[in-house]
Image: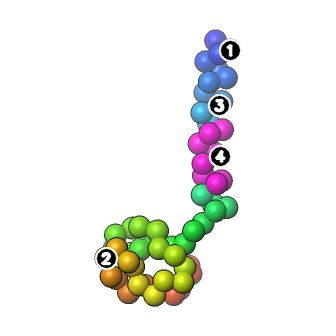
Amino acid sequence: MLFTIGLVVFFVLVIVGIFLYQKIYNPGRLCNICYRVVPDLAPQCPFCDNELKWDKN
């Protein structure tokens, strides 16, 4: 039983760690059409050639 509780706690910590890593290391923005990560300085998406807006909401 303790092993199962420890395993659940471990997986919860791994998931929380992944979300924290993504929040801290943010390599750019998501494209509005293809939802791929695009660098902040790119004027358009290199995957679908969509023009990117510069609002950071």
Check disc 1 and report the residue beneath it.
2
Label 4 SS: helix
Judge depth for marks 2 and 1 and give the one in front: 2
For label 3, count other residues whose C-alpha is less than 10 Å away and answer few (under 14), some (14-19) or many (20+): few
Q: Which residues are magenta?
A: 13-21
Q: Is the residue 4 above or below the residue 15 in the image?
A: above
- Asked if residue 52 shows in the view, the reply is yes
Label 2 SS: loop
Chain-order first, disc 2 or disc 1: 1
* Residue type (three-letter) at the residue carrying disc 3: Phe
The quadrant holding residue 50 is bottom left
List x then y, in percent, for residue 19.
60, 52
List x then y, in percent, for residue 24.
67, 61
Query: At x 64% / y 62%, what residue is drawn?
Result: 25
- Asked if residue 53 shows in the view, the reply is no
Check disc 2 and report the residue beneath it.
48
Chain-order first, disc 3 or disc 2: 3
